[in-house]
Image (cartoon, rainbow, N blue to C red):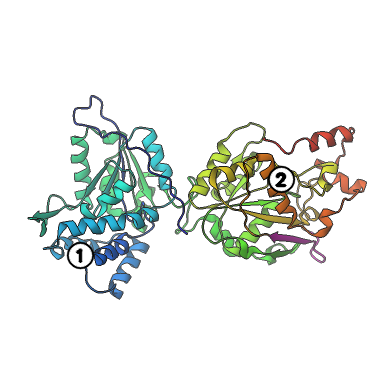
């Protein structure tokens, strides 16, 4: 299922040569920049549909596109691409434009999810969006229109009487030719390149990135990585949230999934059930109960077994911790500063869901303290319900049990010494569901009920804790003097905003 894309917003007006003040633009390459790979397969299929390319896709064609996806542009491949004008000689231009229109929807669907955030950012700043690509203009103009772009700088084939004549009209938009075309466009549209932004993956777009004040290497090919490092150009990836790095094309969360094995935690025995209920693509909100500092690790282990990345909402104290804080940032986690009332965490979670990602949260907000920890009826805050209302994403409930036996709230570190008889940690995943209704309290109660359904039977029985059990739910194991007052405060913290 393709990620849900944001609808294109109203275009900013084009800058005219008579504008009194030059302003900045945002210039985007297409293949391996806005798309994860080549646009060629989609465009070729569209050309076949209108009858301009005969037969079916060949093995050579498939191999060329796969090579491009891995290494990016190469000089020999672009030499062949330049001959495209001769190969198109005699083509009916109206059919080519029809093929471009057919390709626009699948190409738009293939645009990397976080590119849309960049589009919105530049639109909000009043910067025209410009597509700069080697692909012929007649084939990519419909895509640019679908994305709400303001202009296209692309290779144009010569024409005679409604048919291509086998020539290139003007510059071949690649390498230095692309940079020259952008300069000419900027001069004619009162654009200040020193203030402008450019995004490309290709080493051969070094001339383009060199003429703007804000160059970005996107999903860079191997040679571009070296250039970007030497020139200190930021490297970004539009398939992951801002700030999430990649090493050899792999984000840290996926790298850790590859090594997540139960042998690494011999002091706990994980029993995971129902992880196949986590969809492998598409948006979703994973919700779980909160019993221990170990809960995020238990969730991460379950997700690693499934092989699905997720964006966790986590408290700011984790982000502020040395080493650990940098790690969770690299994982794409979303910082929550509890008690401030800031809506930014939910906005970032909404962006992730709009990009077709999963987000994970614990609606209880924090580990319950005192008698509230042993209450069989779980109470949650409104965050998950608000995300449901904003995104329409399905909710996947997860029940965690036994994590407090390894790392209770009373301890600053987990107990890693019990390797002979490790506690059992149970992670149960329920079926995805869509909460109904508009009332936040009712939706929250429904979500918490689904979480409780994933817990063992003993979780539903009221339990009178011993003094030792009660102490384990408080920081440093210290039961407050006014335990009744503390319990009332704890019970009153949920449901609600915060």
Residue 31, given in percent of the width and then of the height, sits at 32, 56
Residue 260, given in percent of the width and then of the height, sits at 62, 63
- Reading the image, the residue beneath label 1 is 80
- Left or right, residue 420 beside residue 163: right
Residue 76, given in percent of the width and then of the height, sits at 23, 64
Q: Is residue 128 magenta?
A: no
Q: Is residue 428 magenta?
A: yes
Q: Nearer the viewer, residue 154 or 226?
A: 154
- Report whether residue 403 is seen: yes
Mark 2 vs 1, N-terminal side: 1
- Identify the element where label 1 is drawn: helix
Residue 405, given in percent of the width and then of the height, sits at 81, 55
Vertical placement of residue 494 versus 327, above or below: above
- As drawn, the label of residue 393 is none
Q: Quadrant of residue 380?
A: top right
Q: Nearer the viewer, residue 346 or 93?
A: 93
- Reading the image, the residue beneath label 2 is 445
Q: How many numbered circles are shown? A: 2
Nearer the viewer's eye, disc 2 or disc 1? 2
**Residue neighbourhood size for the residue with mark 2, other residues' Cα within 10 Å, grouped as few (<14), some (14–19), many (≥20):** many
- Left or right, residue 168 beside residue 43: left
């Amino acid at each position: 299922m393709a990620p849900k894309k944001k609808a294109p917003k109203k275009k900013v007006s084009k800058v005219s040569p008579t504008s009194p003040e030059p302003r900045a633009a945002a210039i985007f390459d297409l293949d391996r920049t806005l798309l994860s790979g080549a646009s060629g397969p989609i465009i070729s299929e569209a050309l076949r549909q209108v009858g301009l390319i005969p037969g079916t896709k060949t093995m050579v064609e498939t191999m060329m596109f796969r090579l491009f996806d891995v290494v990016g542009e190469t000089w020999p491949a672009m030499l062949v691409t330049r001959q495209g004008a001769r190969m198109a000689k005699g083509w009916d231009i109206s059919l080519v434009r029809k093929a471009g229109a057919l390709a626009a929807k699948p190409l738009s669907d293939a645009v990397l999810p976080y590119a849309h955030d960049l589009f919105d950012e530049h639109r909000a700043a009043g910067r025209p969006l410009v597509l700069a690509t080697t692909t012929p203009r007649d084939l990519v103009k419909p895509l640019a229109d679908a994305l709400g772009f303001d202009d296209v700088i692309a290779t144009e084939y010569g024409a005679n009487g409604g048919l291509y004549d086998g020539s290139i009209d003007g510059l071949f938009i690649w390498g230095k030719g692309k940079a020259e075309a952008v300069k000419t466009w900027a001069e004619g549209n009162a654009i200040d390149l020193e203030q402008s932004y450019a995004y490309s993956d290709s080493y051969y777009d070094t001339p383009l990135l060199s003429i703007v004040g804000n160059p970005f290497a996107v999903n860079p090919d191997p040679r571009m990585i070296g250039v970007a490092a030497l020139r200190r150009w930021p490297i970004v990836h539009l398939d992951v949230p801002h700030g999430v790095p990649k090493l050899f094309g792999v984000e840290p969360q996926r790298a850790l999934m590859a090594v997540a094995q139960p042998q690494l935690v011999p002091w706990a025995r994980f029993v995971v059930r129902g992880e196949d209920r986590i969809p492998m693509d598409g948006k979703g909100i994973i919700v779980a109960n909160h019993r221990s500092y170990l809960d995020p690790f238990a969730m991460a282990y379950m997700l690693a077994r499934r092989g699905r990345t997720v964006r966790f909402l986590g408290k700011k104290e984790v982000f502020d911790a040395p080493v650990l804080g940098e790690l969770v940032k690299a994982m794409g986690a979303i910082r929550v500063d509890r008690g401030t009332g800031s809506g930014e965490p939910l906005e970032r979670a909404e962006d992730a869901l709009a990009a077709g990602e999963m987000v994970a949260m614990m609606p209880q907000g924090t580990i319950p303290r005192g008698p509230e920890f042993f209450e069989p009826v779980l109470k949650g805050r409104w965050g998950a319900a608000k995300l449901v209302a904003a995104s329409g994403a399905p909710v996947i409930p997860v029940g965690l049990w036994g994590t407090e036996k390894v790392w209770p709230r009373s301890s600053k570190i987990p107990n890693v010494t019990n390797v002979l008889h490790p506690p059992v940690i149970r992670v149960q995943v329920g079926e995805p569901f869509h909460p109904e209704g508009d009332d936040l309290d009712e939706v929250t109660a429904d979500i918490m009920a689904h979480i409780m359904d994933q817990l063992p039977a003993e979780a539903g029985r009221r339990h009178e804790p011993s003094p030792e059990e009660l102490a384990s739910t408080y920081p440093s194991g210290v039961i407050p003097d006014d335990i009744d007052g503390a319990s009332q405060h704890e019970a009153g913290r949920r449901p609600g905003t915060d």
